[in-house]
Structure formats: C-alpha cells, structure tokens
Image (cartoon, rainbow, N blue to C red):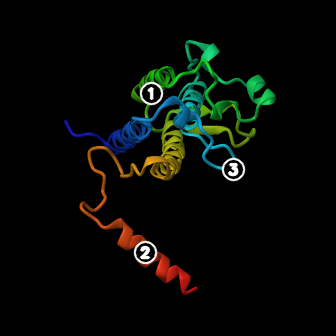
Amino acid sequence: MLMSDDETMKSFLQQSLRRGRTNLRWKLSGLDERSLRWPRTPTGFNLLGALKHMAQVEIVYFGDTFGRTWPNREEVVSDADIDLDPQADWCATESETTAYLLDFYTRVSDFADETIDSLSLDSPGRVPHWPTGRDETTLGQIMVHVLVDLTRHVGQIDIVREGIDGAAGLSEAAPNLPEDFDHDTYLERLRTIADRF
C-alpha cells in the first residue's frame, strides 16, 4: 500500500528526529560526568544541559501541546523552577546523572513518538507558553519546530565536543569527514589566508 504525501512527510520528519536524537546521544558518549557538565561557553552551555533541555522541549511540544501529560511531573522543569533559575532546564542537578538523563531522554523520545504515531500532520495543538493568538499549531509545524531546535543544539554540541577531545563527525555510522586527512596542514593554510586580512 502506498503512503500519502502527508504520511511520507510525517515519516521523513520522524526519521529525522530519531536520527538527531541518536546523534545527540552519540556526541555525549565516552566523556566523564565532569566533562559533560563543565560550562563550555561564557553563557554556560554544557553538554549534559543540552540533553536535559531537549528532553524538556519534547515533553512540552509533543505532550502539553497535544493534551498529553508527562507521567512523572517531578521530572519536568516547571515555570516555578524557571522563575527561580531561568537556566533550570539547561543544567543537570547533582542528583541527575548522565545515565539518568540518557534514560530520561529515551523515555521522552518514546513518549514523543507515541504522540507522533497517534496524530496526523494537520492535527491541531496549542503551545501553552506561546502568546495568545499565535499559540495554535499543528503536529507538522511542531515536528519541524522541534527538529530545527534539535539540529541547532546538536550542531552546538558538535563544536563543543570537538574542542574537548577532537571527536568530530556527522554521525557514528557516517562521519562525513575525509579519511587520512592532514588537518595540521589544512589549519595552517586557513590561518595563512586569514592572516592576510
């Protein structure tokens, strides 16, 4: 049986979300707790915080937006938490280990996929924190919104991770980087060109 255009697009978006989630997890692998928590930018961006943030994003956009409640509200960063600490969803607490947050993100991903599987692209939703009048949306719009957010943060993680230990690449299965490449010579060439300006 052939899929409709909407079903094909929904499948493509869902596969893209799953690939992004897999790559996010992969980018965090092999580092210790301190390295994952250490602030890597002047604004405090850290790898474990990015994982926690994306879990919170998917709970809101694939849960609350479509009338589904995350089963354990204690795991959700609330508005009250944000009032106390505007970055509460961007950093792991001392009790939130990497293993816990990876498991949490897996459970959230399954929860999000349940929403996606049960709705059509044009199914209506309402984003609770968007302004009135602009808060009405559809599953398709939310899938694109979350995919943009996820890929943005995985890109940030790519750069940060390369700065930590040199680990780089598009994905574990397909790094999309030249093999046996002389990076030192390449970097020197780039510096030479930049120095001319």
Residue 19 locus on image (x, y percent): 36, 40
Residue drawn at x 42%, y 23% is 110
What's the CA distance linking mark 3 and mark 1? 30 Å
Which of 171 and 113 lies nearest the eye of the viewer? 171
Q: Which residue is mark 3?
A: 42
**Which residue position is annotated with label 2?**
188
Mark 1 secondary-structure assignment: helix
Q: Residue at x 49, y 47 (%)?
A: 164
| Image label count | 3
Q: Is residue 81 left or right of residue 122?
A: right
Up-down relation of residue 72 to residue 83 (above or below): above
Residue 129, image x and y in percent? 71, 34
| Image quadrant occupied by the C terminus | bottom right
Three-letter residue code for mark 1 = Ser
Image x and y of residue 116, in percent: 43, 30
Residue at the farthest right position: 84
Residue 78 x/y as whole percent: 70, 23
